[in-house]
Amino acid sequence: MEQRLPPQLMPKSTSSSSPAPKSPAKPSPPPPTQPRRGAPPAQGVDPTKIQLPCAGCQAVLNVPHGLARFRCPQCGVDLAVDHTKLQNFLASSNSAAPSGPAPTSVATTQPPLATSLPVLPSGMAQPLRLVAGATISMMLPAAEPPEEINEVAIDVERDEDEGGTVGETFTDYRPPKLSLGLSHPDPVVETSSLSAVQPPEPTYCLNIMGELDETKALSCLQIETIVYACQRHLHHLPTGHRAGFFIGDGAGVGKGRTIAGLIWENWQQGRHKAVWVSVGSDLKYDARRDLDDVGAKCVQVHPLNKLPYSKLDSKAIGIKNGVIFVTYSSLIASSERGRSRLQQLVQWCGQKFDGLLVFDECHKAKNLIPDAGSQPTRTGKAVLEIQLPEARVVYCSATGASEPRNLGYMVRLGLWGEGTSFHDFSQFLGALEKGGVGALELVAMDMKARGMYVCRTLSYKGADFDIVEAPLEERMMNMYKKAAEFWAELRLELLSASELFADGSSNQIWRLYWASHQRFFRHMCMSAKVPAVVRLAKEALAENKCVVIGLQSTGEARTEEAVTKYGVEMEDFVSGPRELLLKLVEENYPLPPKPDSFQQGDEKVTEIQRKRHSALDVSFKGRVRKVAKVVDVSDDDTDDYSPSESDHESTESDEEFHMCQICNTEEEKSLLLHCSGCSRHVHPNCLTPPWTGIITDDWACYTCKIVEDEEKEQDVHVADCSKRYDSAVEKRLKILDLIRSLDLPNNPLDDIIDQLGGPDNVAEITGRRGMLIRTLDGKGVIYQARNAKEVSMEMINMHEKQQFMDGKKLIAIISEAGSAGVSLHADRRAKNQRRRVHITLELPWSADRAIQQFGRTHRSNQTSAPQYRLLFTNLGGEKRFASIVAKRLESLGALTQGDRRAGPSLSAFNYDSNYGKKALTMMYRGIMEQDSFPVVPPGCSDDETSIQQFINEAKAALVSVGIIRDAFIYNGKDPGKLSGRIVDSDMHDVARFLNRLLGLPPNIQNRLFDLFTSILDIVLHNARIEGQLDSGIVDIRAKNVEMTESPKTVHTDSLSGASTVLFTFTIDRGVTWESAKAKLEEREKNVAGTSNDGFYESRREWMGRRHFILAFEGSTEGMYKIVRPAIGDALREMPSTELKSKYRKVSSIDKVSKGWQEEYDASSKQCMHGSKCKIGSYCTVGRRLQEVNILGGLILPVWGTIEKALANQVRLIHRRIRVVRLVTTNDNKRIVGLLIPNSAVESVLTGLQWVQDIDD
């Protein structure tokens, strides 16, 4: 049935009975159909746009010209415009009464989702369900038809929205405004982004400069840092506190000697007290060495951890001046009497302290502002408290702020608070998180421009950085598969046991279970890489190189537990995974309550008797047992009471009298009932009810009979509990036996040392105290302390390091605990100058640790740069750990170096992002059959049978690792079908997905991971098309870039004098016909081109002409690089299917030459939409000559104004903060800043309220 406009939008007739207007040539339109119940009202009619009805809710939408795909704002259905009907309609739109139906927006075949399904990338087929439209001529402008929809313009617009090309990451560094000192001994570089920012003019004069000219102790880089730090310390923030400085130089540049120079300069200025906070007490020797090197031999270094807790300047200690060297751990230490090191330091410094306060390796103070639900660390709070108002604070670390949240303790930088655009740190943090990585990149540039920050790093030229995949060997593959199956079975056992013996500790059990699960499979992944590590190490040694192997966990805890259980001599090395599993089951397997021991044996009888004798007999007619004071019942169930006063009278007589203990009258023994339980005597008639039965020797009173029945029930209960307990213990023992029988790998650290020749060949620089080594006969292993007799445990790591640097050992294994501050590079002063091959067996948990570990082998004064080898298995789940580090490295490079690409290239493994969360949700919905998959799952064909089989396997896998909960199997409509639910918090929890993924067998693990990454690729692709992808700093490239107007200062910082400047450029992006022809000819000469290389013209015409392109095969087969007359090289390579569907090859050179030149000339003043473009002169799509406005210099002070101006822009891409880099072609001047759309310039200037031309 035809779909027409809703009745409320149909033209109203003048009268219900009036005849229709006469139009014999045109048939009258059919009556309108009744709209769907609840259909939303139509959108307001905009005569400058095309009005099209939604195929889902029937609402009429105003569709901008050129928009081919969009989403209905009312019902959320993904829509696409039927271009065929649109052309027919436009052809007849000038007629008085159009005869054809209007174009309609049609719903795609994909159903609407709660989270939007992406539009498939161009070149991929997407069938449409066509729906007939309605006549809507009364809504279109009658004067002129709208311009034609230009598909080429849409492609160009999407390509432009993706951003510019990525330029070089680093540039060589020389101090731009100082010429003091000698060059640095090694090449030093700075990110291109930071190099485009100029620091303030240096005004501070060093007191120690004359001495440095003689000693040559510091390089020009280190002198520059001292000058700017001292200059910064002369200023105060609006809060009244002294301004601080941030040294962000990379590992190995020489931060230690720079700090020593700062201490010596302040000493010469009369400030003889300083505090140096660092990560390890061993580094005090390096501090002493650095101070001696700069000439400060008279400055004493006092290690605080060796001093008592009393006042430092007291007579007993007598420290009046010098450097107090304290570690972060000591900073939060306290004595038994409650006196803290922090109080001790504050007292020594005094509230008016204006000396130097250095936080070396300040990343240790992070987490002052933790994530939601966490608490600030004690270290972070201590670092904040010790920053006295007048102290000259220096933050120093290569990884000072891997996340913007960790800037919270850097309160002396003045980035937030009084006198800034941000009221407090929370507001500052919110702006950065909202602005994405682009905003983080601005912070680093902003700090440098204000003279509070330097960040240089050693050149990576010559350093190799490779990601090496280590496939699982067959034995390891089987081992991993069986381990995954065992964990799934163990989970079911724990579930069953928890339900039977739940005692309120179930949540704790599952927390321990999943934590152990993650550690277990992380350990398995490490062990799987051991053969590759050994192979790479031996290859490096064969090539006359030496090896450094980096890991995080040594497995010491599991080893010590095994030594405690099995002794110091064992048959083989300890298996960390096995010991972890054994500990989990032994300590946490749910057991029923154990029966009390007194209920087994004589103690039980005595206790029951005691209870009987103290209990009131409820059958005794309510009388008070006064006889209890007279009658003495013995504890051995015998009746030795005699009514005679003589103790020697016989008690054996049959004529003996006894007292009835109810009526208190004497009676012959034979006439009284004698209870065999409580030994009481009563008349049969005194009982309630009276006893009428036969009197027997084993008669028991009513009370004792109840007790006996309870005893029997209790005995049954105890027996049942014992049986259940014994059964559970037996089941636990079987599980433990099964764990012991599993084939599991040994501790990787011990295994590697053993395979590479033992401790005699391998230097171990870790935090563990002991190690397992193979016995001389090779038949077992023995545990021994790491240190020898002549070396103390405190100095063992320094000894091992020296063995490596002297070349006595050519392999070193380092962990985070043992390698902090250690230099293992190919130092020119060391005997061992072989090239280092740095292998990361285990990637650190955070980027901070990764950068610190990489910096052990890449430092100043080295003969060769290291080779980095990052090992990953071919298990998809292991990329979880790479994902964590990649996320940190990305923001670390952005925040501390001004360019996210500055860190090692691990971005391909960054899955835990907003795009990753969206992809995961789409995958889960597909598996739960709530929506269809946007891609065909790996290993499946297009038929539903194979996809359904994959879904069944995926469901079973996700049930086994606890992602799908409350699982059940259908018995009715779909017998055997597995179902369940995924809680909302898990739907987008990428970290949990990748964690649990590790516990699956390799086959289904890799298939699930491949599906996830395939969906993520589509999500990222569509984010680029929609202009939503945050690309960080991008380059604006053009054949000609010139500054057209004088830069305008729009803001000046009162503290540093730095300014915010608006730059205006004119760029020419076009490619002339001669250049295009030369490109093709050069390619044909130098490269074996394909038959498809050449010039193409569009198959369709727009505004009476066709578009021309140059296409040649790109880096991937079937993909083509595109060159256009107006914009030059396109960023996106075009698939061959798309190329052939939209374009056809042209052989006539004259035709191409003419068309190319016409388009080149026309694009100088007009965008590709033509003269009727709705944005008008502000539109830059396909425009060869453009005006580009960049706001450079300080950005943070004017952040709010810029955000407000961009929020009002029409195009979505213009609303986002975009950081760009541009180099002028006439004078090679580099500018980095915010790209301000032409339509927003006036709003920005109005918001800033004043503009001043820069004086030439």
Image (cartoon, helix red, strand yellow):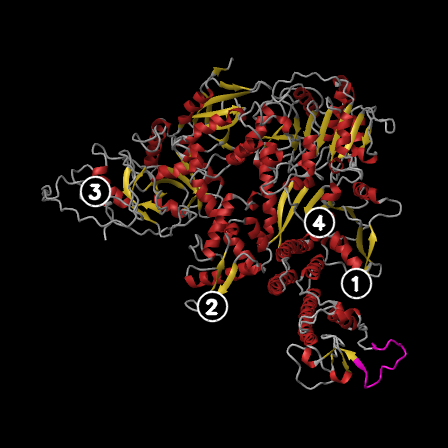
Quadrant in which residue 69 is drawn = top left
Q: Which mark is residue 571?
A: 1
Q: Are marks 1 and 2 in contact (CB under 8 Å)?
A: no
The three-letter amino acid code for the residue at tag 3 is Met
Q: Which residue is mark 3?
A: 10
Q: How far apart are labels 1 and 4 at the CA level?
A: 23 Å
Q: Which residue is mark 4?
A: 553
Quadrant in which residue 1211 is drawn = top left
What segment carries the magenta color? 641-657
Quadrant in which residue 378 is drawn = top right
* SS label for mark 3: loop
* SS label for mark 1: loop
Q: How far apart are labels 3 and 1 at the CA level?
A: 90 Å
* SS label for mark 2: loop
Q: Earlier in the sequence, mark 1 or mark 2?
A: 1
User: How dense is the environment of label 4, judged by Cα within 10 Å: few (below 14), some, or many (20 and up)?
Assistant: some
Q: Earlier in the sequence, mark 3 or mark 1?
A: 3
Mark whose residue sits in front, 2 or 4: 2
Side of 536 relative to 1211 (left or right): right
Q: How far apart are labels 3 and 2 at the CA level?
A: 53 Å
Q: Are marks 3 and 1 in contact (CB under 8 Å)?
A: no
Q: At which x and y percent is residue 428?
A: 55, 31
The three-letter amino acid code for the residue at tag 2 is Gly
Q: Are marks 1 and 4 in contact (CB under 8 Å)?
A: no
Q: At which x and y percent is residue 66?
A: 33, 38
Q: Which residue is mark 2?
A: 976
